């Protein structure tokens, strides 16, 4: 009965994430070597914008992480998940 | 003459632009770099927010938080944060609705007998009290109606450059609730390559949690009516994260992380129980939940940020699994849309989540099995479900009097989110519970107001 309750696994998303990241990083790295990708310091005007930082909205992220940590079985990814709360 | 002046300006721009990709100080410095005088690229940022979270018929939480961030413009950064949570309302105890009223003890209770009893106090006076129990009507989801909790969390993070291309960071968190204490520390190292277009990072996290459940920690898998309690319990966790950040183009930044963490100790929720049903679906008793004593989780996370002149698009995905049998997928996206003056933005967001059930998740136990001490939980958070979040944020930038040229203006923002969680792979209702909703959806709304300024 318990096995019947077990959900479908979705390895395709993991594979897609890894494949996407690998492709992106490889393209980035190879193209950099070829001098096409990656940018020069003076080309970082858009990248230096506050909303392009990976931690652009830390309080939004903290509130969301706390909400999802207390309601779902998964947490983390951006940084370390879990902890700091007895709600799960 | 003109040529010399141009070279000087370009050299300053190059120097400032290559300082760091992180933090708003760079943008400020790039603009301030036109001045001939030495440039102070340091910046402090104060952020505050208060959120109101409400679940339909369950928990309400109010969560104010503040954060102070300093950046000296040369890679040294410090962040201090404080969070206060206040929760109240009704929390599901894991038991199933029944066709008859059900009586439960509050966490501090040690009996299901709700008969009023008369005691004589030390001063000789007579007083009457009722054992701390609550009764749930037939057909209703059992919830502890007087759930209350408070949390205070403090965290600190420091980042220190080692050389021009690498840096350390250290952090710690202390979180306190009246029945829970958590201490965590983390350390990380990151190094830039390829003209700072590629950054590799590695981090370690160590966490120690002390559980002090009200009334004691139940013996996992024990008969609920016997109130077999133990003293305080603890659990420990250690995590490792490896990450790559890659500048793809002048508009596109990508991040990819893999994380693994392992927790061991008392991983049960001390306030959750599981109903025992007979073949017809009548409740015959309850057992405290029993989870494994270890949990190993692994996750992969990919985030992409793409900037256009008036919009920034963020798309992220995460896949996670653990050795409890939970597999989850998360996709989220938001679009920040600026007005032409770049002093206001609107940011719609969407998040989709799906998880499978833990191997030992069971909404109820059949009495005919006769064995209640195996691994089991009816906690819906370990069941199969999907969830969606829709959000909208509005922010306005306000330039302050006396601010420096290029300094990031203050920001006032309001954010609204709605969240809905629906169970999947529902087991068919037993005969006696045919007309009762055993898997009610969770609906929640979150409203947040925030203010940020740099000085």
Image (spheres, rainbow, N blue to C red):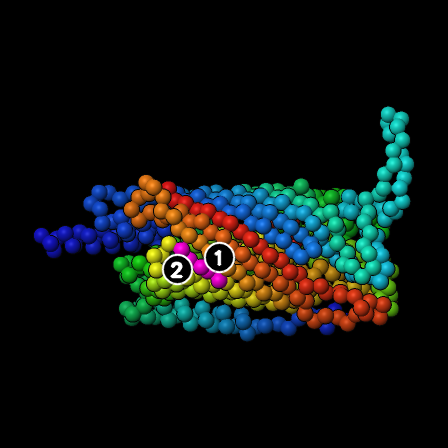
> Could you tell whether A24 is left or right of B210 in the image?
left
Query: Does the stretch in magenta take in B408?
Result: no
In primary-sequence order, the first of circles 1 and 2 is 2
Q: Nearer the viewer, residue B453 or B80?
A: B453
Relative side of B92 to A36, left or right: right
Q: Position of residue B64 (x, y in %)?
A: 55, 45
Q: Where residue A41 is drawn, which disc sits there?
A: none
Q: CA distance from mark 1 to mark 2?
A: 12 Å
Front position in the image: B392 or B240: B392
- Crowd tier of the residue under label 1, counting other residues whose Cα lies within 10 Å: few below 14, some 14–19, many 20 or above: some
Asked whether residue B149 is in view, the answer is yes
Determine the secondary structure under disc 2: strand
Crowding at dot 2, Cα within 10 Å, few <14 / some 14-19 / many 20+, comes out as some
Q: Which residue is pictured at 24% across the width and 53% down the height?
A: B13
Whether residue B411 sits left or right of residue A44 in the image: it is: right
* Residue furthest out toward the left: B1
Instruction: Pick the quarter of the image with the C terminus of chain B.
Output: top left
Is B252 above or below relative to B416?
A: below
Q: Nearer the viewer, residue B69 or B371?
A: B69
Residue for badge 2: B338
Q: Residue at x 82, y 52 (%)?
A: B135
For mark 1, what is the residue? B393
In the rendered structure, the residue with mark 1 lies on which chain?
Answer: B
Determine the main secondary structure of the stretch shown in magenta.
Answer: strand
The reply to whether dot 1 and dot 2 touch (C-beta < 8 Å) is: no
Give the camera-side residue of B332 and B270: B332
Instruction: Identify the magenta region.
Output: B344-348
Residue B146 at what x, y percent from top left? 73, 47
Residue B345 among magenta residues = yes
Q: The disc numbered 2 marks a residue on which chain?
A: B
On the image, the x and y values in percent for residue B138 come to 83, 59
């Amino acid at each position: 009965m318990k096995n019947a309750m077990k959900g479908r696994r979705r390895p395709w998303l993991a594979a897609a994430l890894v494949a996407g990241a690998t492709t992106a990083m490889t393209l980035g790295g190879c193209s950099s070597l070829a001098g096409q990708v990656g940018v020069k310091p003076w080309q970082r005007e858009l990248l230096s914008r506050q909303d392009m930082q990976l931690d652009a909205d830390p309080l939004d992220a903290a509130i969301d992480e706390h909400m999802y940590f207390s309601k779902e079985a998964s947490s983390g990814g951006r940084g370390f998940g879990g902890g700091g709360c007895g709600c799960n | 003459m003109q040529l010399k002046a141009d070279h000087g300006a370009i050299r300053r721009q190059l120097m400032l632009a290559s300082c760091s990709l992180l933090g708003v100080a760079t943008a400020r410095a790039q603009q301030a770099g036109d001045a001939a005088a030495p440039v102070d690229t340091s910046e402090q940022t104060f952020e505050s927010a208060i959120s109101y979270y409400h679940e339909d018929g369950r928990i309400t939480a109010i969560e104010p938080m503040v954060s102070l961030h300093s950046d000296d413009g040369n890679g040294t950064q410090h962040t201090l944060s404080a969070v206060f949570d206040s929760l109240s309302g009704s929390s599901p105890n894991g038991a199933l609705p029944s066709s008859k009223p059900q009586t439960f003890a509050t966490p501090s209770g040690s009996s299901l007998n709700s008969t009023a009893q008369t005691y004589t106090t030390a001063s000789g006076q007579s007083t009457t009290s009722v054992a701390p129990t609550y009764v749930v009507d037939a057909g209703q989801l059992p919830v502890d109606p007087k759930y209350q909790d408070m949390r205070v969390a403090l965290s600190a993070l420091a980042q220190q450059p080692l050389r021009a291309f690498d840096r350390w960071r250290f952090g710690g968190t202390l979180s306190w609730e009246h029945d829970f204490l958590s201490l965590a520390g983390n350390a990380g190292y990151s190094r830039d390559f390829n003209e700072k277009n590629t950054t590799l990072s590695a981090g370690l996290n160590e966490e120690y949690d002390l559980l002090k459940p009200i009334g004691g920690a139940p013996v996992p898998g024990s008969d609920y009516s016997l109130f077999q309690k133990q003293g305080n319990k603890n659990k420990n966790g250690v995590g490792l994260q490896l990450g790559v950040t890659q500048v793809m183009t002048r508009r596109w930044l990508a991040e990819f992380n893999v994380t693994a963490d392992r927790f061991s100790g008392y991983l049960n929720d001390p306030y959750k129980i599981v109903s025992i049903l007979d073949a017809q679906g009548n409740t015959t008793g309850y057992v405290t939940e029993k989870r494994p004593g270890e949990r190993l989780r692994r996750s992969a996370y990919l985030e992409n940020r793409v900037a256009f002149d008036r919009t920034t698009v963020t798309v992220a995905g995460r896949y996670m699994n653990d050795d409890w049998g939970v597999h989850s997928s998360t996709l989220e996206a938001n679009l920040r849309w600026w007005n032409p003056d770049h002093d206001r933005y609107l940011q719609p967001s969407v998040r989709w989540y799906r998880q499978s059930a833990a191997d030992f998740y069971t909404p109820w136990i059949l009495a005919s099995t006769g064995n209640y001490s195996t691994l089991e939980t009816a906690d819906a958070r370990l069941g199969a479900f999907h969830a969606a979040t829709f959000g909208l944020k509005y922010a306005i930038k306000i330039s302050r009097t006396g601010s420096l040229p290029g300094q990031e203006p203050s920001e006032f923002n309001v954010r609204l989110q709605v969240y809905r969680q629906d169970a999947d792979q529902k087991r068919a209702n037993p005969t006696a519970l045919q007309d009762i909703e055993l898997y009610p959806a969770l609906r929640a709304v979150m409203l947040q107001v925030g203010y940020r300024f740099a000085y």
